[in-house]
Each structure stands twice: as C-alpha cells, then as structure tokens.
Image (cartoon, rainbow, N blue to C red):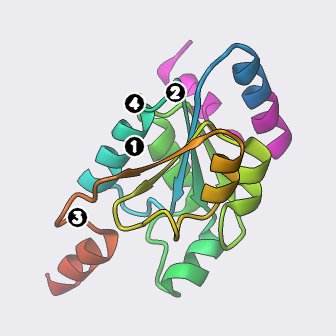
Amino acid sequence: MQKLDWIKNKILRDEDSLLRHINMWKAAGKKIVFTNGCFDILHHGHLDLLARAADFGNILIVALNTDASVKKLKGEERPVNHEEDRMFQIASLLCVDVVCLFDEDTPEQLIQKITPDVLVKGGDYNINTIVGANHVMNNGGKVEIVPFVQGYSTTGLIANIKKL
C-alpha cells in the first residue's frame, strides 16, 4: 500500500465505519484509546499528547472538532487550518490509528458510542472537567491525564505570528 493511501485510510468520515472498526478491534481484544481536540496548528504539545496517549493501548482514535465547532469554541478567526488539512496531518502520524470528526460542542455522544478503554486529555484538564470521563469509568475504563507541555499552545503561536 502506498503511504498516501495508508494515511487516507486512517480517516473515517462516517460513524458506521468507525463503529465497525471499533467492534472488530474490541472483538480482537485490542485496547481502544480515545482523545479529542481542535489540533488547529500542530505543535510539540499536541505531538507529545498523542504519542503518550498511544502508549495507553493498542488503537488510538483521535476525534477532531469540525471547523464549525472550532469557531464556536475559539472564535471567528479559528480554525487556521481547515478540518480536511487537520485530519490529514493527524492521520499522518505513526501513533494515530484513526481520525474522525465531531460537530457537537463536546465529544460526549461519540465517547458514549465508542466506550473506549482509555480516555486521554491534556494536563490543562482535571477529572471533573473531562467530558465522557464518568461514562468511561462506569464501563470499566480509565481516564488518563497527560502532563501539559509548558510553553506550547496554538493561541500562543498565533499571538507570536501576529507580532511579526
């Protein structure tokens, strides 16, 4: 398989396809890890989070906010990168197995459908602010918080670029 096809095959655009893959992996005894975010401008902090998240299981699913949901969360000037570009970038990473989109304000519904074994968020969250944490733990899963990498944020990058 060509590398470009390998990347594109990791992008699952419909929920049915995603759930089929998850059911297959769970039947094979794979440990499913889930994380989510905007991942607008990839930086060291994002890459650290994704690599560490992948270490918690066998399959890493990354759910990206759609462009519309990023605008609602971050404001009219965001996202900087279109959802198609963000999906392609995340799918290009060796540690990521699947990329999908969600359009809601939070990935709560998606987490409930997937019921991952491990839910991962960055250190700027705590157990009480992680959407889906209760569902995952009530179904025997774990919630992991990866330490925040200081000095890296998309908002900070944008501010620095604007100063130039």
Residue that numbered label 2 is attached to: 4
Q: Residues within 10 Å of mark 1 (few under 14, many from 20)?
A: many
Q: Is residue 103 above or below residue 164?
A: above
At which x and y percent is residue 108? 70, 61
Q: Secondary structure at mark 4?
A: loop
Side of 116 relative to 153 (left or right): right
Q: Nearer the viewer, residue 85 or 69?
A: 69
Q: Give me the residue at 49% from left, 81% from top.
A: 74
Write the start and end of the magenta stretch as one range: 1-20
At which x and y percent is residue 42? 35, 55
Lower position in the chain sequence, tag 4 or tag 1: 1
Residue that numbered label 1 is attached to: 50
Amino acid tagged 2:
Leu
Outermost left residue? 164
The image quadrant that residue 133 belongs to is bottom right
Real-space Cα separation, disc 4 to disc 3, in angstroms: 21 Å
Can you tell which of label 4 and label 3 is closer to the viewer?
Answer: 4
Q: Is residue 74 above or below residue 8?
A: below
Outermost right residue? 16
Q: Secondary structure at mark 3?
A: loop
Lower position in the chain sequence, tag 1 or tag 2: 2
Amino acid tagged 4:
Asp
Side of 112 relative to 144 (left or right): right
Mark carried by residue 55: 4
- Quadrant containing the C terminus is bottom left
Q: Can see residue 73?
A: yes
Real-space Cα separation, disc 4 to disc 2, in angstroms: 24 Å
Q: Give me the residue at 76% from left, 52% from top.
A: 112
- Quadrant containing the N terminus is top right
